[in-house]
Amino acid sequence: MDYKKAGVDIEAGYRSVELMKEYVKGTKRPEVLGGLGGFSGAFSLSKIKDMENPVLVSGTDGVGTKIKLAFIMDRHDTVGIDCVAMCVNDIVCAGGEPLFFLDYIACGKNHPEKVASIVKGVAEGCKMAGAALIGGETAEHPGLMPEEEYDLAGFAVGVVDEKDLIDGKNIKSGDVILGIASSGVHSNGFSLIRKIFVMTTESLNTYYDELGKTLGEALIEPTKIYVKALKNVKEAGVVIKGCSHITGGGFYENIPRMLPDGVTAVIEKGSYPIPPIFELMRKEGNLEEKVMYNTYNMGLGMVLAVAPENAQKAIEAIEAAGDKAYVVGKIQDGEKGVILC
């Protein structure tokens, strides 16, 4: 009896590391000290000394049951982007610049090529976010997980000068709400999606005219990363008063999180185009409108509050980053919450 016969292949682990090294290398920032394979990742903080009062901000998340889609489609190179996005988008909501990222892959059996494909996506997401992938862990769990399945989670750290923290406290009546377009469903609500649609290779390969692609292609589209868009807004001299990453809980849970007491966010539903995947989901699942807005991003992955005189400048900065932005509502006096009209 040895470890391999017990279900853990150490040699496969070594091969996974070798295969992923080329992807990790592409995320390296000047602050990264050492290479891949150490017991910890080292990152120099020398460049943040110029900040008046540097504050570290962090985020951790996974991809949720969207992972099941990757299993069925046997496509593993995009869920890593989702994982990075879910973490770094939370960091930029506080005004932070993502610095580095670590991933954790738990699998029933280590298939080196599959693990490398997952990490390829993680590295791609890190490059989009400007963050270094400085470490991670691949854990083989025989007997705990099916051999062909895995789970993926991540952790990111960023930094912001305290004076630039986005905390929502200065949001007031009359401020404008901007929405930045999502790429689709992103990484939330897949437990419901798996009840709406039959999750088989055949159903996911079904082409829908209204989508312009197959159902699987529409659903697996990776989460948008908004780091560059928000950085552009800041560099344009626009103060972002509040910021909300629209994830699980949709509009009703996430938008109030950026608001101070005494104000309400009013969102105009017709102010931006809703991607067709959401209407297909509503129709196929016979879902009430409130359920949709309480579960999904409905086409807006990030929502910002800015002063009205800065709205156009912010939109131009966001669109210069390659994203699409809209004026989607306003702030008014009232009980803390959100009104859809």
Image (spheres, rainbow, N blue to C red):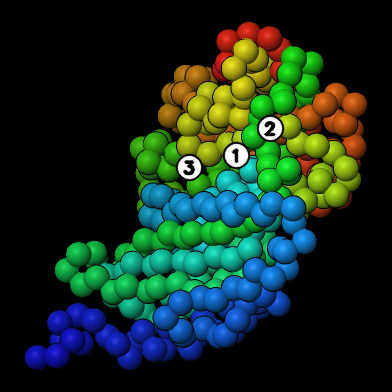
Q: Which of marks 3 and 2 is nearer the N terminus?
A: 3
Q: Name the residue under label 3.
A: 188
Q: Alpha carbon of mark 3 to alpha carbon of mark 2: how far? A: 22 Å
Q: Can residue 262 be seen in this view?
A: yes
* Element assignment for label 3: loop
Q: Alpha carbon of mark 3 to alpha carbon of mark 1: how far? A: 12 Å
Q: Which corner quadrant holds the N terminus?
A: bottom left
Q: Position of residue 178 (x, y in %)?
A: 75, 31
Q: Which corner quadrant holds the C terminus?
A: top right
Identify which residue is drawn at 27% across, 85% down: 9
Nearest-to-viewer mark from 3 and 2: 2
Side (left or right) of 123 relative to 144: right
Q: Alpha carbon of mark 1 to alpha carbon of mark 2: how far? A: 10 Å
Identify which residue is drawn at 46% across, 84% down: 38
Q: Earlier in the sequence, mark 3 or mark 1?
A: 3
Side (left or right) of 321 relative to 134: right
Q: Which mark, residue 242?
A: 2
Q: Is residue 147 visible?
A: no
Going by the numbered disc 3, the residue's amino acid type is Asn
Q: Mark 1 points at which residue?
A: 245
Mark 3 neighbour density, 10 Å: few (under 14) some (14–19) many (20 or more): many
Q: Where is residue 308 in the image (x, y as percent from the top left)?
A: 85, 24
Q: Where is residue 160 in the image (x, y as percent from the top left)?
A: 68, 51
